[in-house]
Image: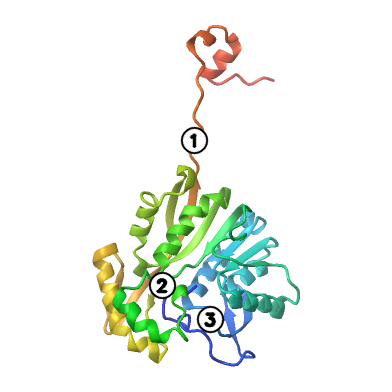
């Protein structure tokens, strides 16, 4: 999913279906990707997320079950396979993106191994299937729900601007955090790439209060890496709504602590690669009634109040 207007991630491809481009990650991981309508090009932020994974994934995660949410072109899923992962699922809400991602895997590896799903966020859609993952990677939309004024200006531009993949990041991310405990394995983690224009602290604050995860599970977040990126306008259509976009970002500073700096005529935002973990609520300790404790064997009572001596 798109997180800014850099690297062509804001506009779908208009070139013929045979067009391709190269995605180059750290340590020589390179892929040839189809550039097709309905599939967003890998962005500069997506490259940064992939480079972080190359440098920092744990061996237990490579050998575990992995999910790439909002896979788009499938680039991150392909990278995970190239790193040695053998149990990978990938989802996208766009059917055309999933089809392109499958073709990208065949183009680069020659055989299918990644479990691609046309699904919203997690595999299974509305079914009762709840698979647990040791690692979940997500690059959500970077901008909040557009204002009414901005929506009106964008109405005539939907033919080349997929608003669902760029805006509504607040509702998408809150829903992701609420559902995460049902899909994350014990001791697992999610690594998500966040756009500072979305108001990151506000989103996590809401996820811990009004949008709490199910069963009162606790969500914990930790910043792993912060990268400054310029907000660039690559299409004439986006240039036409530039003033309204900037007005929404400025309003976001006051409403939900959107963060960015202005350098000359260019906005610089911050891509925050963040670790998210879940703590399940503790199981309440059942205390024995006082009358039963009098009949408890002495050895068991001793064990409950102190460590048991090592034997042998």
Q: Residue at label 3?
A: 41
Closest to the observer, 152 or 223: 152
Q: Residues within 10 Å of mark 2 (few under 14, many from 20)?
A: many
Q: Residue at label 1?
A: 282
Residue 143, compared with residue 284, is above or below; it is: below
Cα gap from disc 1 to disc 2, whole angstroms: 36 Å
Q: Quadrant of residue 28?
A: bottom right
Q: Quadrant of the C terminus?
A: top right
Cα gap from disc 3 to disc 1, whole angstroms: 43 Å
Residue 173 at x, y = what percent? 44, 61
**Which residue is at 33% across, 81% downward?**
152
Residue 201, compared with residue 73, is above or below; it is: above
Q: Secondary structure at mark 1?
A: loop
Q: Secondary structure at mark 2?
A: loop
Q: Residues within 10 Å of mark 3 (few under 14, many from 20)?
A: many
**Which residue is at 37% across, 79% downward?**
230
Label 3 with label 1: CB-CB less than 8 Å: no
Residue 56 at x, y = what percent? 55, 61
| Comes first in the chain, label 3 or label 1 | 3
In the rendered view, does 170 fall on the left or right side of 307? Answer: left
Label 1 with label 2: CB-CB less than 8 Å: no
Q: Residue at label 2?
A: 167
Residue 97 at x, y = what percent? 59, 76
Q: Secondary structure at mark 3?
A: loop
Q: Nearer the viewer, mark 1 or mark 2?
A: 2
Question: Which residue sits furthest left?
Answer: 254
């Amino acid at each position: 999913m798109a997180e800014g207007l850099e690297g062509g991630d804001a506009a779908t491809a208009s070139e013929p279906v045979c067009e391709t481009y190269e995605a180059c990650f750290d340590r020589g991981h390179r892929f040839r990707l189809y550039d097709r309508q309905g599939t967003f090009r890998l962005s500069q932020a997506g490259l940064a997320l992939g480079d972080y994974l190359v440098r920092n994934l744990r061996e237990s995660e490579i050998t575990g079950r992995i999910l790439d949410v909002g896979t788009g072109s499938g680039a991150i899923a392909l990278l995970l396979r190239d790193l040695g992962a053998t149990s990978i699922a990938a989802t996208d809400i766009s059917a055309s993106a999933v089809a392109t991602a499958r073709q990208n895997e065949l183009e680069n590896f020659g055989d299918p191994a990644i479990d691609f799903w046309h699904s919203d966020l997690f595999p299974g859609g509305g079914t009762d299937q709840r698979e647990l993952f040791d690692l979940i990677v997500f690059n959500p939309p970077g901008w909040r729900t557009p204002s009414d004024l901005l929506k009106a200006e964008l109405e005539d531009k939907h033919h080349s601007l997929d608003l669902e993949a760029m805006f509504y990041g607040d509702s998408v991310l809150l829903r992701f955090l609420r559902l995460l405990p049902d899909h994350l394995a014990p001791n697992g983690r999610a690594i998500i790439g966040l756009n500072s224009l979305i108001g990151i602290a506000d989103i996590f604050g809401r996820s811990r209060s009004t949008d709490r995860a199910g069963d009162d599970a606790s969500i914990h977040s930790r910043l792993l890496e912060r990268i400054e990126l310029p907000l660039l306008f690559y299409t004439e259509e986006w240039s036409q709504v530039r003033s309204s976009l900037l007005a929404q970002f400025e309003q976001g500073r006051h409403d939900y602590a959107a963060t960015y700096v202005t350098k000359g005529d260019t906005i610089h935002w911050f891509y925050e690669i963040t670790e998210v973990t879940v703590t399940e609520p503790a199981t309440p300790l059942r205390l024995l009634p006082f009358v039963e404790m009098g009949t408890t064997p002495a050895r068991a009572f001793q064990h409950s109040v102190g460590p048991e001596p090592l034997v042998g």
